[in-house]
Amino acid sequence: MVGGGQLLLSLLTGLADAAGLFFVASGLTVIFGVTRVVNFAHGSLTMLGAYCGWSLISRLPPTPLGFALGTLATMVLLAVIGAGLEIGLLRRVYRAPELFQLLATFGVVLMTQDIVQWLWGVEDLALRRPPWLRAFVRLGGARFPRFDLIVIALFPLVFLLLWLVFTRTRWGRLVRAATEDREMVAALGVDQRLLFTSVFALGAALAGLGGVLMLPDASANLGMDLTTVTDAFVVVVVGGLGSLPGAAAASLLIGLLQAFGIMLVPRATLALVFVVMAVVLVLRPNGLLGRPPGRGGVLGEVRALVRPAPHVLRWLGLAALILAALAPLLLGPYALAVGTEMLIAMLFAASLHFMMGPGGMVSFGHAAWFGIGAYASAFAVHLLAAPMPVGLLLAPLAAGLIAALFGAFVVRLSGVYLAMLTLAFAQITWAIAFQWVDLTGGDNGILGVWPARLVAGPRGFYWLALTLAVAGTLGLRAVLAAPFGYTLRGGRDSRVRAEAIGLPVTAIQLTAFALSAAAAGLAGGLYAYAKGSVFPTYISLGHSVDALLMVLLGGVATMSGPILGALAYTGLYDVLLSATSLWRLALGAAIIVLVLAAPEGIAGGALKLWQRRRPA
Amino acid sequence: MTRGGPEAPVLAVAGLAKAFGGVAAVAEVSFAVARGEMLALIGPNGAGKSTCFNILSGQIRPDRGAVYLNGESVTGLSSRAIWRRGVGRTFQITATFASMTVRENVQMALISHHRRVWRFLRPARHYFAAEADALLAPVGMQDQAERAAGELAYGDLKRLELAIALANAPRLLLMDEPTAGMAPAERGGLMALTRRLASERAIAVLFTEHDMDVVFGVADRILVLDRGRLIAAGSGAEIRANPEVRAVYLGSGATSGGH
Ligand SMILES: Nc1ncnc2c1ncn2[C@@H]1O[C@H](COP(=O)(O)OP(=O)(O)OP(=O)(O)O)[C@@H](O)[C@H]1O
Ligand SMILES: [Mg+2]
């Protein structure tokens, strides 16, 4: 039985969690509302806030006043960093398609990870806790940290303050007007640059506040950027993009559900948040308090003319294919293993490109399909004792079928909401793989997924991977060039026009979603046999982000983009990893340079150069 | 033959009404269009013309009222279903596929019309290319067939939309401000072409237009909408003489030559 004291304790814990979520998420939602930038670096700002706060507060007297001063100083520092980020990077990409803004913020995430590690080291940094921070209050027999009560009190305080700023000041009214209608504000002759910079500074300061307040109960650590940004995105999306009251309501909902969820279904905790988000998005496609996106929508604004590949490119591709086929005669086993991984990455990236480029459906959780494919193969080996061909058939089949079911909910959404629903699904799948230990082995994974004798050596498996990955990638390309693919692209370009000429947009999108998942599943199946094992990490957010990076690096507009992107990304990754310990810094910097220099991606940039040299 | 028999008008509208958040955009509108007839729907900005069009083509569901095509009710059907019944349309804010060429845009309409959407292997460019060019020629877009729709001038987009709208051999053509963005000289040409197509192929045409020279030049009949209500209907001469219409137009400032 659960006592009243326990209930009260859960309630307070939930409220404290909700407050923490709100500080970070409010910054994110305000930034999104005004600039329309999907700021994946918001978690990195929170992480910076935690680390800067740790450094400042550790040097101040261990009193409440010292803590408060340290917190305020951190917020100011983060505001400066946020403004610098806006002026130095994001301002330059507002005009670029939204997907490249996303790519730029990924670059910031990578760079920040290494900068923080370089400045503060790899150890988790906990705050030395003076007595006032360690104090408890007694509540009906239970003890509750006094500091958490302060955090709870800050929640309504910060909300009210923000609310007053947004409703009572001229600046706040401009921010709200800009959230509702950007063009109108531009027409009013407001200095947009200053508005955007100041909004970013405010958002970053809020992220910093969130980061500092995490210190007393936890610590500053290098993993907090991705976990925080995921949670913050969930809150923002559940509340409705750009809505401050929405963010507050969603923080409460999620914080409380988490606190009580632990009590009721301890095993479901990892997935709970995402289940909530999935349910909200299915019932309310624009979040609790969000409004339908206006014209233009969010994410996926790529409308360049798509042409068949020039002949030179076809010959180049053929030459590369012949070279790749001959590679096992020239290369050693290690290089072949790397080659196999590159081929699998290529198919994985091509499958994501299929739905997010021509399909206009950006996925933050594409690793789910890769992972489902991998687990399907592993189950085929272990539960069915099936031979490899069956395993490799089950992989795309399982991913495709599950996607066809789940996709019915996905294709009703668009933009960030759609992306977040795919993320929710991936996180739920990950949690199942992680927590259903009896079936999946949990963290230990499933071992002994070995390929058939015929292709057991590195050469044989390389050839198998080459055949299947190239066939899969070329197959996807062919489908894109056929009426099906054109219809998919038509639905993305103009849904209104597509339906006005009778094109079945929703059915086409759903089919494309399933096809894309099946191809990713095949990549996952291949990977399982290549590695001989399957782990929950295949489904992690990091792996989904890898796929996004590959596609965005290569460029969404051209069909050769994801191929180049996958090869460049895995290649760059291997080279950087062996050349420098600061490989994230280098990769992030490379991404940012690329975004600023070639917002069309590698393939798009190359195509542009090519066309410039040969005027049509 | 159609259920309504040969006598039924191509399009008949009865008591159509649609409100947005309490504001009546369209209120109790009824009219009909016959085969080969050009009917102009005019009215000041915000009168409800586009809302009418969007109801007729299935983009918006009406609150009340009914829409009949050849005597058959299509009220509340999806825009896809209505298109299948032979209704082509152009949009006030043009809607085309920006990542495709002009020809490919028309090919898509033909692929849909001939039910070739679910084809996965043969490249789309091999489908109905000649037929697409045949549709582009009369609207004067054949020279630009290879250009990206995303980079066309506004007037050319309108022409492309007309070609797309004709791809399913429509019985009813809905044109929302077909000549907006064109030079005055071009406007007459495009509407004369529409006029010719309408009589040759017995297409009923309903169009909105702010340029009164164009309206009085080609329309067989004119409907005047003001704040969602039909305030007048008749020939050009009757409309010109109508005091209520004059009041509306003098009051709103939208006159001959419009925008
Ligand atoms: N989706 C919508 N939501 C809310 N109000 C709408 C919507 N669409 C139209 N309205 C309103 O309905 C009224 C009629 O608009 P409509 O676009 O039909 O006018 P119109 O006659 O086509 O005007 P114009 O000549 O400017 O094109 C206007 O007051 C408009 O603001
Ligand atoms: Mg209109």
Image (cartoon, grey):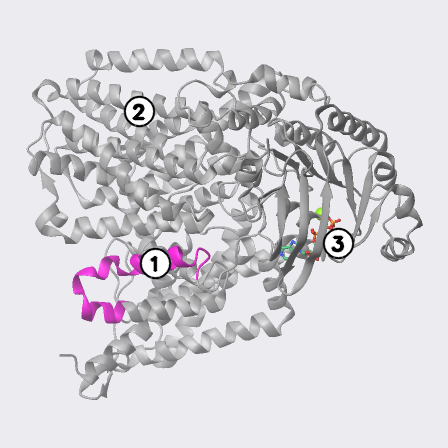
Q: Chain of mark 1?
A: A
Q: Considering the whole magenta stretch, tell me its main secondary structure.
A: helix
Left or right: where does residue A613 sit relative to residue A158? right
Q: Vertical placement of B43 versus A263: above or below? A: above
- Quarter holding the N terminus of chain A is bottom left
> What's the amino acid at mark 3?
Ala
Relative image position of residue B3 (x, y in whole percent): 59, 37
Relative image position of residue B82 (x, y in whole percent): 57, 39
Residue A304 versus residue B65: which sits nearer the camera?
B65
Tell me the distance, in whole angstroms, between the alpha carbons under discs 3 and 2.
53 Å
Question: Which region is colored magenta?
Answer: A258-287
Residue lying at 77% horizontally and 36% vertically, measured from the top left:
B38
- Quarter holding the C terminus of chain A is top right
The label on residue A472 is 2
Tell me the distance, in whole angstroms, between the alpha carbons under discs 2 and 1.
33 Å
The label on residue A308 is none
Which type of secondary structure does the marked residue at label 2 adopt?
helix
Left or right: where does residue A240 sit relative to residue A430? right
The verdict on label 3 being within 8 Å of ligand 1 is: yes
Relative image position of residue A35 (x, y in whole percent): 55, 53
Tell me the distance, in whole angstroms, between the alpha carbons under discs 3 and 1.
40 Å
Select label 3 or label 1 by which is in front: 3
Residue A568 counted in the magenta span:
no
Number of numbered discs on residues: 3
Q: Are dots 3 and 2 in contact, CB under 8 Å?
A: no
The label on residue B47 is 3
Q: Earlier in the sequence, mark 2 or mark 1?
A: 1
The answer to which image quadrant residue A180 occupies is bottom right
Mark 2: few/some/many CA within 10 Å (<14, 14-19, 20+): many
> What's the amino acid at mark 1?
Val
Disc 1 marks which residue?
A279
